[in-house]
Image (spheres, grey):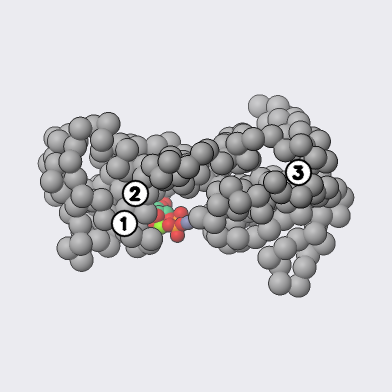
Amino acid sequence: TAPARDRLRIAIQKSGRLADPARSLLAACGLSWRQSRDKLFCFGESLPVDLLLVRDDDIPGLIADGVCDLGVVGLNELDEQAKARRQLGLADAYRPLRGLGFGACRLMIAVPEDWDWQGVQMLQGKRIATSYPAILSAWLQEQGVDAQVVELSGSVEIAPKLGTAEVICDLVSSGATLAANQLKPVEVLLESEAVLAGPAHALDDARAGLMAMLLRRLDGLSKVQD
Ligand code: PRP
Ligand code: ZN
Ligand code: MG
C-alpha cells in the first residue's frame, strides 16, 4: 500500500488546450502556487495542494500509479485508457469526478469529403487510423463492423493521403483540421469535455479531506456561474 501523504497532488496539462483553463479553474477554487524554476512542479501556498505539469496522455496513468491524486484531463483520454485497462483484464484505477465545462470536443469517424456516406456498414473491411484504439474497437464491435484499427499517436488526419488508412477516428473541435485535410465527420463515438479525474477508490489519509473541500469549492463555482 502507498504511504500516507498529507499534501494533495493534481496533474494538469503542461501546454495545450486544457492547460490555461485548468489552472484558472483551480485558482478560482482558492489554490495558489509558488512557481518552481522548471515549472513542472508547483508547490501549493494557500493550501497543501501541489500541481504537476505533464502531457495530458500521462494523466490517467499517474493517477493509476498513485503518483497524483487528481487530474484535469479530457474524458476521451480517460475513457480510452480505462477501456484499454479493461481489455487487458486490469481493475478500474480512476474515474471522472466532475465535468468541468471546457475542452468540449467529439471523437468522430471522418471519411474523405467525396464519399457518399450511407452508414457504418461502409466501414466494413476498411483501415481506420486513430489514437483511440480501445474506444474505436469497442465501438466497431458494438456496430457489428469488422474493420482494421491502425494506431497512430498523432497527425492522424494525414493517414488517408498517405494511404495508411481509408478512414480516421479522431477528436473534432472546430472541424478546421478535418476540412484542411479534405475529410468530413460522419459518426460520433464520444462526446468529450475536460473532467476532474480521481482514483477509483477513496483515499484514506489527510488527502481525503482536501479532496472533499476542493470538490465542494468546484461545485460552489458552477452554482455561481448558473
Ligand atoms: C485534436 C485532434 C485534431 C484537432 C482537431 O488534437 O487530434 O488534431 O485537435 O481540432 P479542430 O477540429 O479544432 O481542428 P489536440 O489539439 O487535442 O492535440 P493532440 O492530438 O496532440 O493531443
Ligand atoms: Zn494528447
Ligand atoms: Mg491532434
- Residue at (20, 62) in percent of width and height: 164
12 to the left or right of 92: right
The answer to which of marks 2 and 3 sits earlier in the sequence is 3
Tell whether label 2 touches label 1 (CB within 8 Å).
yes
Judging by the rendered image, the residue that carries numbered circle 3 is 28
Q: Is residue 107 visible?
A: no
Q: Is residue 201 above or below residue 54?
A: above
**For the residue marked with disc 1, what is the amino acid?**
Glu
- Residue at (52, 38) in percent of width and height: 92
134 to the left or right of 102: left
Q: In the drawing, what numbered circle is on residue 92?
A: none
Q: Is residue 194 above or below residue 13?
A: above
Q: CA distance from mark 2 to mark 3?
A: 36 Å
Judging by the rendered image, the residue that carries numbered circle 2 is 133
**For the residue marked with disc 2, what is the amino acid?**
Pro
Q: Residue furthest right?
A: 46
Q: What is the quadrant of residue 141 in the picture? A: top left
Q: Quadrant of the C terminus?
A: top right
Tell whether label 3 touches label 1 (CB within 8 Å).
no
The answer to which of marks 1 and 3 sits earlier in the sequence is 3
Judging by the rendered image, the residue that carries numbered circle 1 is 151
